[in-house]
């Protein structure tokens, strides 16, 4: 009986190892630029692949980081295209299968821009996840504010980042444009955070309060 339990435990461990990290979204990020404002439906195409050796069920969640007022967005997965008010949905991919993971924006004749994330998590293993980033009219050539509530400066930055109203912020998270968490920092009330260890490039900076509510998002340029 002990051998049987050992065999089952080893099998569960092997399954967990096989699941972790076996989901990819490509291309990522997706850029959709220079489309006419008269366009009624603008699509950023991407694909998600289950690289595991067995079928997996996932849940995607749309996170609108920035969108011009008057614009709306929607997600199409491997099953269907959803209405604009649907922000999360389950889907299943067989082993090795690839499916659609597209984002539509509807400008409604308004000139503007959007940054939208689609976070995908394995229902059976939360460590197996990926985030697709979809940028509409976002060349990322200059820093752009995603949320006005809490300002950070200087931007671009080199060694240090200053936080306006640091008492409202408990944690900073620095994400790559592809949605991968690069660094997490507890502020401990400090108004200045060292960022010299970050590589040069563009980051999405998220700020959280003590109740774990996201209070601000910024596009940060690191020289």
Image (cartoon, rainbow, N blue to C red):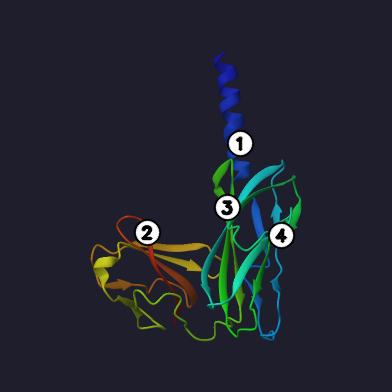
**Where's the C terminus, which quadrant?**
bottom left
Mark 3 highlights which residue?
129
Q: Are marks 4 and 1 in contact (CB under 8 Å)?
A: no
Looking at marks 1 and 2 on the same chain, the residue that comes earlier in the sequence is marked by 1
* Percent position of residue 93, x then y: 72, 47
Examine the rendered structure and indicate whether residue 25 appears above or below residue 41: above
Task: Name the element at disc 3.
Answer: strand
Looking at marks 3 and 4 on the same chain, the residue that comes earlier in the sequence is marked by 4
Foreground mark, 1 or 2?
Answer: 2
Looking at marks 2 and 4 on the same chain, the residue that comes earlier in the sequence is marked by 4
Mark 1 highlights which residue?
14
> In the image shown, does 119 or 160 lie closer to the viewer?
119
Dot 3 alpha-carbon crowd within 10 angstroms: few under 14, some 14 to 19, many 20 or more: many
Residue 81, disc: 4
Q: Quadrant of residue 80?
A: bottom right
Q: Are marks 1 and 3 in contact (CB under 8 Å)?
A: no
Foreground mark, 3 or 4?
Answer: 4
Q: Are marks 1 and 2 in contact (CB under 8 Å)?
A: no
Task: Name the element at disc 4.
Answer: loop
Taking the view exactly as shown, the residue that stands out farthest to the top is 1
Q: Are marks 2 and 4 in contact (CB under 8 Å)?
A: no
Mark 2 highlights which residue?
213
Q: Are marks 3 and 4 in contact (CB under 8 Å)?
A: no
Examine the rendered structure and indicate whether residue 106 appears above or below residue 87: below
Looking at marks 4 and 1 on the same chain, the residue that comes earlier in the sequence is marked by 1
């Amino acid at each position: 009986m002990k051998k049987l339990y050992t065999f089952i435990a080893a099998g569960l461990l092997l399954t967990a190892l096989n699941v972790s990290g076996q989901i990819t979204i490509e291309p990522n990020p997706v850029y959709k630029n220079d489309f006419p404002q008269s366009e009624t439906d603008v699509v950023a195409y991407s694909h998600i692949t289950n690289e595991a050796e067995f079928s997996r069920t996932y849940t995607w969640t749309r996170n609108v980081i920035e969108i011009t007022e008057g614009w709306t967005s929607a997600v199409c997965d491997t099953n269907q295209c959803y209405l604009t008010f649907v922000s999360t949905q389950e889907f299943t991919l067989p082993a090795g299968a690839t499916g659609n993971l597209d984002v539509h924006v509807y400008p409604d004749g308004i000139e503007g821009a959007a940054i939208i994330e689609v976070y995908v998590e394995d229902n059976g293993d939360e460590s197996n996840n990926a985030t697709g980033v979809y940028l509409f009219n976002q060349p990322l050539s200059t820093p752009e504010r995603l949320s006005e509530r809490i300002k950070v400066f200087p931007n671009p930055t080199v060694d240090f980042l200053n936080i306006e109203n640091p008492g409202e912020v408990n944690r900073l998270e620095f994400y790559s444009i592809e949605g991968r968490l690069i660094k997490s920092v507890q502020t401990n009330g400090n108004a200045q955070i060292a960022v010299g260890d970050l590589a040069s490039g563009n980051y999405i900076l998220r700020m959280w309060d003590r109740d774990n509510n996201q209070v601000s998002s910024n596009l940060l340029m690191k020289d």
